[in-house]
Amino acid sequence: MVTFQLSVNGQSRTVATAPEVPLLWVLRDSLGLRGTKFGCGRGICGACTVLIEGTAMRSCVTTAASVTRRSITTIEGLAAGALHPVQQAWIDEDVPQCGYCQAGQIMMAVSLLRTTADPSDEQIADAMSGNLCRCGTYLRIRRAVRRAAMTGASR
Amino acid sequence: MSVVRIDRRSFLKIGATTAGALIVGYYIDDHPAAAEPFRPNGYVRIDPDGAVTLWAKNPDMGQGVKTSLPMMIAEELDVDWDRVRVEQADLNSAWYGGQGAGGSDGTPSDGPLGQRAGAIARALLVAAAAQTWGVESAACETDRGIVHHRASGRSLSYGELTATAATLPVPKEAPRLKDISRYTIVGKPTRGVDTPKIVVGAPIYGLDVHVPGMLYAVIEKCPVHGGKPVRVDSSAALAVNGVRRVITIDGHANPTYLRPGVAVIAESTWAAMKGREALRVEWDEGPGANESSATLTAQFRAAAKQPGKVLAESGDVDRAFVASLAEVRLKSRTSETEVRLKSGSSQTETHAAAVDVEYEAPFLAHATLEPQNCTAHVHDGRCEIWGPLQMPTSGAMVVADVLGIPHEAVSIHVTRIGGGFGRRLLSDYAAEAAVISKVVGAPVQVVWSRDDDLRHDYYRPAGLHHVRAAIDGDRRLLVWDHHLVNVSRNRYRLEQTPPESTETYGLLAPIRDAKHQFDGDLQPTLIPNCRVQYTEVRTAVPTGALRAPSHNINAFVIESVLDELAHEAGVDPVALRLSYFGERRDFPSETDEATDFNATRLKQVLKLVVERSRWGTAMPKGRGLGLAVHFTFGSYCAQVADVSVDANKRLRVHRIVAVIDVGLPVNPLNLEAQTQGGIIDGLSAALFGEITIDRGRTVQSTFETYPLLRHRDAPDIEVHIVPSRERPTGFGEIALPPVAPAVANAIFAASGIRIRRLPIVSNGFRV
């Protein structure tokens, strides 16, 4: 067991776990932040996507101990007062079906728009193809990313 | 999710009502108090401050019933949709009767129950206002949560009427429902009620449940299907920090209830997973270890050469087929002569055609993105369950059975479901949580890994179809001889009904009798020589229902063979489908009103899809359109796929145009989503979906080896919804069956290569 500090959604949290525990399980089981989802455990479905220093990372294959000095944002910390434009676009386009993958999709889209303010469909497809949606909401995801780009999600 | 416990008193009350309830689904509060909210039934509550809460009876796994069924209630209750709060109903048979999500049955069966509940509540509120004012109910009207007496200019809000309404007797006669022309909620594109929670990561799924004192469990199962643990060395597992217990699960006689395994119980999910890696288990692999995909395929092929069990027969199939073949051979010689004489002009003529073909289908996994999981707490002879169950009612029976307690002692809190696709029709993971909780005496959350999910699914059955079919020169279907050989999910779940009874849906239809359900769109009574045969191949591989069960493969075969016949005969595939019904319009079902088949509606979706796609226009080399149509669970869908295939068999699906007719469209926004989603699901399975077996073990265990369609490969999908006032029918499954044949038929049009084996990539295509 090791004890360390994590910076999650702007708050410093103390965690005591085995050193190899993935960030996903620390967020979910230790910190009670269950918005970040378990999908595959191998970093290939994207359901567990969080932002580390603003960039999308797969929390199921990132140990918590490796991100102690970095700023972690989860879906719960995305809205600052009002919803983030990407979250609002997801509502406006009624994207979710079962919704299980959508926290990861939203974090991925936020990461994309941070570096590419006005992505083409090709850039959207490239960025978002690492995130599986088993319900097949891809067409609405595409529309929602475009909408978020127009409403200033790159802030 | 927050945990709300049913207190013992109300639990017993509900239990007692179950036994004595005369009107299933309408539980009347027997002690209404003036200050309490008005709750005339399980679906509706109105608080004195006017807040309206509606309950969604059925689980929502993305199909949208948590929104669309309350829309139907709200419409009859006559309230402002924006002020409605929707709650997921717990299992409560007294209030709701059976609860579950399957068979595309929510809208047609439960929609009317909700409408009636809303109309009764509204009638009571009107009666309360009328009593208050001393006027007739008939002189009052409602408008979005307010009762008006226009003659005197008086009005009262629903909130002001709750106390009085709660004292009134429930009307004996069901009130008349609204005329569709006055609908203000049903038919409007409406966003999902849970969407605002989903986008902020609210803990609403099964895996998000947290009960104080809860432990986590993972289960190692025998890698060989049907095997069981013999000896367990748990010492290393127990040495892992956080691991509390290791226990053996014996399984149930019915493997869809509970399968054997070794459970590692720990203080965190991760500790349980690490503990499991340290387990040493000796397995009794059982006879399944002798099976592989190759041996099963060989059995399918051998069985197809022998006669099967005849399920339906008319005319003289063998003689008619031989005669048709002879005519085709004669015609082909004649047309060769004609070609020489007329320089190819005969190619546009219609002629007789016959095909004798085999189609093969693999096992498919469900791969719900939320892995199987459930939380249970067994205590004091009762069991409380929180989880993503598609079938809470049967889930309670399963849990009760494995625990040996009455089903009334099982309470179920239904969470949002992270994908169902038929996997969670079975409640095995709830039974696992229950039996483990019973042993450890604490609340337990069972968590499956992705590996567990793919390797221990209840798969869509693999099989083979041998079809001989013929049409004459006037586009009449003369012969359809269909021999289905597969493994039966009915057999796997130990049903007493014949093994084929789950496997024939969508084959030829609608000939329904007590034994055989065929729900499809080919009408056998219109085919003079028609035969359906079935042969079962036994296997240890677990099988179950997958979205549009049996339809999801049978439609592929029917629609592909029709396309083969059309091309062989030089007939437009649309013309062939339009003509095979002749003048017949309606084919009423003998056993279930919901599956009446209306040929006019099927023809309509066909005609519309031709109009909305580029059907009939010349395509460039390497590009082609393919068409398919299907009837499933009372709904109709036609699709045209537009694909290109290059010289290296690189396949691109560009666009799919879909027309659906699901009767009255309750929530068009959701219908569009379900159609897009059903198409992506069906396309993903058609392109890549294949579970293979090696020495009794499932080979695929990750999303690398069991790929699903990703964003960049999603085609454009255009959805057209037929405006209709017919009874609304299900929409969660209908879009799936036509995709595979539409794409396969398009591949033929583009490349001349006929896909007779799924998945498409197994035919050398690359995506």
Image: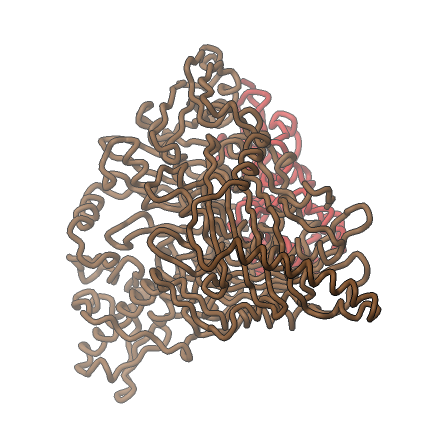
Q: In the image shown, does A63 or B760 lie closer to the viewer?
A: B760
Find the residue positioned furthest to the bottom: B151
Residue located at (62% from left, 25% from top): A65
B206 versus B718 height, above or below: above
Quarter-of-image position of residue B759: top right
Q: Quadrant of the N terminus of chain B?
A: top left
Query: Residue B527, how many percent across, how many down?
Result: 50, 63
Query: Residue B120, how many percent across, how many down?
Result: 26, 68
Visible residue check, residue B197:
no
B171 versus B378 height, above or below: below
User: Which lettered chain is shown in brown?
Assistant: B
Q: Is residue B749 left or right of residue B722?
A: right
B763 versus A96 height, above or below: above
Q: How is the image coloured?
A: by chain
Q: In the image shown, does B48 or B123 lie closer to the viewer?
A: B123
Quarter-of-image position of residue A24: top right
Q: Is residue B567 left or right of residue B116?
A: right
Query: Residue B590, how many percent across, how many down?
Result: 35, 62
Q: In the image shown, does B133 or B700 lie closer to the viewer?
A: B700
Q: How many marks?
A: 0
User: Which lettered chain is shown in red?
Assistant: A
Q: In the image shown, does B258 or A43 lie closer to the viewer?
A: B258
Query: Residue B261, how many percent across, how many down?
Result: 42, 23
